[in-house]
Image (cartoon, rainbow, N blue to C red):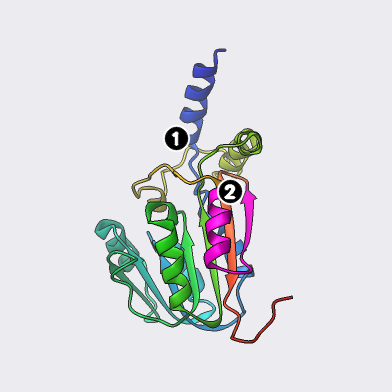
Amino acid sequence: MTPSRVLQALDRFNAAHPWDHNAHYHRWILRQLPRRFGKALDVGSGSGDLARLLATCAESVYGIDANATIVARARDSTFSASVRFSVGDALTDTPPGPYNVITCVAVVHHLPFTDAITLFRRQLAPGGTLVIVGVSRAHSLNDHLLGLAAVPLNLVMGWLKNKGRRAVRPVSMTAPTRPAVMTFPDIVREASRVLPGVRLRRRLFWRYTLVWHHRPSGTVSS
């Protein structure tokens, strides 16, 4: 079978057994956060799945997304008064913080990266936590090898999550996509400049993670 036929077969399998690569990291995100916290901001909240999960730990959650259609779906699926959604530009329309937690999943590559993380730093309360799950442009040999390793795992996950049955594409996967332009080293360099002490790591399923704790003035990180 030629490479093009292999890719076509993979596309057909993924269409029949879709699963949300971003939602795969939602529980991991919760593990980076305190058990209880005050205000949370979810940037690019989409269908609201992560915002509703954050609400199990937060006093209030504010989700913002540029897509009016998917925000309407998020509102229709949310029955907690502590979770609110709005349509807007994350860089200009987000209500001022401070927020104790800021999350941003597969969205920051749609924004000017430096402007976005600078805003997140300004909006985050001292002692607060920023968690980003992002997408970078494959550039190095390691990037391509990690991408190749993810292919068979992606097939297995699609089969297991759908229990072998054909499935309907989740609402969370209907938002517009855009290819990443920054490489992982570019992201590490810029994030380290803006967010001292930030932790970044390449992940499976074509993602990377960024975790930053806003240390109160005078606190030394361990």
Q: Which residues are magenta?
A: 186-203
Disc 1 packing (10 Å; few <14; some 14–19; many ≥20): some
- Residue 193 coordinates in the image, percent (x, y): 55, 63
- Residue 116 coordinates in the image, percent (x, y): 41, 63
Cα–Cα gap, marks 2 and 1: 32 Å
The three-letter code of the residue at mark 2 reads Pro
The mark tally for this picture is 2
Q: Quadrant of residue 153?
A: top right
Disc 2 packing (10 Å; few <14; some 14–19; many ≥20): few
In front: 132, or 10?
Answer: 132
Regarding residue 28, the answer to whether it shows in the image is: yes
- Residue 42 coordinates in the image, percent (x, y): 43, 68
In front: 25, or 181?
Answer: 181
Which badge, 2 or 1, is on the more N-terminal residue? 1
Judged from the image, the secondary structure of the residue bearing numbered disc 2 is helix
Does the magenta run of residues contain 76? no
Judged from the image, the secondary structure of the residue bearing numbered disc 1 is helix
Q: Which residue is mark 2?
A: 185
- Residue 168 coordinates in the image, percent (x, y): 41, 43
**Is residue 2 found left or right of 66 in the rendered image?**
right
Q: Which residue is mark 1?
A: 15
Residue drawn at the location 37% of the way across and 59% of the way down: 46
Residue lying farthest top? 1
Q: Which mark is residue 114?
A: none
